[in-house]
Amino acid sequence: MLLFFLFSSWNPFSGGGGESAGRRSQFPPKSLTSKKFSHSAQTSATPRHPIDPLTVGEIHRVRSILSSYEPFLGQFPAIQSMTIDEPDKSRVLGWQSGDPLPPRKAFVIGLLDNQSHLVTIDLESGRVETHEISSGSGYPMLTMEDVAAAVDAAVSYPGLEVSAAARGLSVANLSCISPSPGWFGPEEEGKRLLKVLCYSKQGTPNFYMRPLEGLVMTVDVDRREVIKFSDTGRGIPIPGGNDPPEMNPINPISMEQPQGPSFTVTDGHLVEWANWEFHLKADQRAGFIVSRVVVRDSETGDRRSVMYKGFPSELFVPYMDVDEAWYFKSYMDAGEFGMGATAMPLVPLNDCPRNAHYMDGVFVSADGRPFIQPNMICLFERYAGDSAWRHTELTVSAGGEKEARAKVTLVARMASSVGNYDYTIDWEFQTDGLIKITVALSGMLMVKATVHDNMNQIENQEETGPMVSENVIGVVHDHFITFHLDMDVDGPNNTFVKVNLVKEENLEGKTPRKSYLKPVRHVAKTEEDARVKLSLYNPSEFHVVNPSRRSRLGNPSGYKVVPEANAASLLDHSDPPQLRSAFTNNQIWVTPYNRSEQWAGGLLTYQSHGDDTLDVWSHRNREIEDKDVVLWYTLGFHHVPCQEDFPIMPTVAASFQLKPVNFFDRNPILRAHPVFEKDLPVCRPSESASAM
């Protein structure tokens, strides 16, 4: 995954060869001084909630304050990140609609003289409240300006033209991309680096399948120069181009809502649907953040808290090849490039159905000016023909009582195109109180060119993946997505409980049964107690409960995380990529709430050493029983490519659930109404269409 592509020839279906390799793209969009991106709803927006993102006006104000700030008078820093500095959690929880907003503050990460400046600004007073220069390892997210400069330096390097000519190409025939370098030792200290790889776009729109194997340029981003040039693959042919396959068309299909959607979005970010209410906002690093999630109790009508904040905290994607041109490919997509920064406008009727509601992201470019990422989030109701609950009561007499209720859910969706891979992330809310979180992968493989054109030519498993086409190896790799889930089940103070399923022997022999399963509760008192490596042969349920809130039967109110398909990292814990991504060493972690601990790979992830990660924080082994806690869940994929993944990969998805457990006194959707034919329009093909 995770190259980061720069040129505007990116779209593999745009046709033609695209622009010359030395030309920069216009991504991210130009600042809002451009009429092309002047969305009136965004430019005039005002904050309505304490955790609303920075508005266009506020971003301009931050830039103005920084421009007159004495330490930056001589040189304005490159703005790597600018977000709302959210008020203390207690203040947000105590705020009610109609109350005055707490003071609005901005948190800025700027880069100046190779140092990361962490600055907090009070927007009302216009004062810089805090200014810290980071002393730890790592750099902030790259900006698109950084990526453009690195690729420009690479395509201008004389050695590239020589290597291209040796393969029968010119630089104008190339598309070049810029993956991050990871961190592999002290020789990489003191400079921000990017690796640049190139592909042939000659004769195909799908350049990702045509690598110039073995060609790697290491660029010093700040000096704008190539500091290392390696070309070990001139004897390896460039794979041939392929056109996208065709198939017989499917008749159009759509879910119709004759009375319109059932959800509402007020003040730009507050979503209400069925028994749910939550705050939804775009984020340049996480993609989008779901906050202040509450559900209405169907028995009492009370609004009950489920979660304070949830978002994808980091994505780790290591490739399993140790060659010079591959070993460094171990990406941290959120902390290195940003899931919001790489989010593309969603495609109506294909990404999102009819009646979807779209949200923009307001982000910041390196010069501190705002730009809009349009239509990057969509909200829609989903009905796929499933039932929310059903039962048929069979009796001895003829017939029986039949009951069924249609399952309609609400989905919040975003799709990020981080180079060759596309990630679609869904948060799906159900009327029974369940939240399902799904990550879907598509896009294009990162492939390795080979001299072989058939598996019969390969001996002793010498390649690091199977062949997916002639002269093309699909390199084995992993994807891990770690979610930050600040659970507040009926309030902030919660406890993590492992409900272990233990085999018991029927020793007394009163019946023919010899064994059975028994749930045994274990309350995690410290962070070490709460670490979980999933195992089919040591099954457990994982509950976050509020010990102070009991059901009418005496059970603690709770939610449980329900794993589905998953995978664990098999890398050695001392391997540099795994040191940086040690948050994947367990599938579940629980930590006490700390507003500075949000990014599993650390605040400054780029070229970091792994000294500020979830793993490091958790080894303090703090107390977590009956505390304000954060649950971290890592969803994983092992990907062994196959021919069906070439040249474009069908979507593969995995999920996990947050499911109520003794949270409600009984099934919360017993009163759900059935749907009848009279409630829906009748849609039939026209006579002319039927006759075709």
Image (cartoon, grey):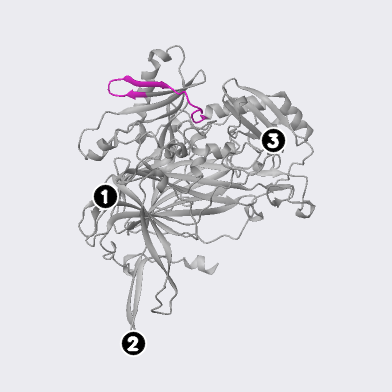
Residue picked out by circle 1: 490
Judge by depth and name the residue closer to the eye, 296 or 656. 656
Look at the picture and state if 538 lies above or below 513. Answer: above
How far is mark 3 from mark 2, CA to CA? Answer: 73 Å
Question: Residue 621 location, x and y as percent?
Answer: 40, 40
The amino acid type found where label 2 is placed reads Val
Label 3: few (<14), some or many (≥20) within 10 Å?
Answer: few
In the picture, measured across the screen, residue 102 lies left or right of residue 647, that is: left
Q: Is residue 355 visible?
A: no
Q: Residues within 10 Å of mark 1 (few under 14, many from 20)?
A: many
Q: Secondary structure at mark 2?
A: loop
Say which residue appears at 40% left-offset and 21% top-offset: 132
Q: Residue 157 appears at what percent x and percent y?
A: 69, 24
Which circle marks residue 396 in the picture? 2
Furthest toward the bottom, the residue is 397
Residue 70 lies in quadrant: top left
Q: SS for tag 1?
A: loop
Which residue shows up at 64% across the image and 32% down it?
A: 196
Q: Of the two numbered discs 3 and 2 on the same chain, state the one appearing first in sequence.
A: 3
Q: Which mark is residue 324?
A: 3
What is the span of residues highlighted in magenta in the rendered image? 120-143
Rendered location of residue 396, percent (x, y)? 34, 87
Q: CA distance from mark 1 to mark 2?
A: 45 Å
Residue ID at (54%, 37%): 579
Give amino acid for label 1: Asp
Above-or-below relation of 69 to 449: above
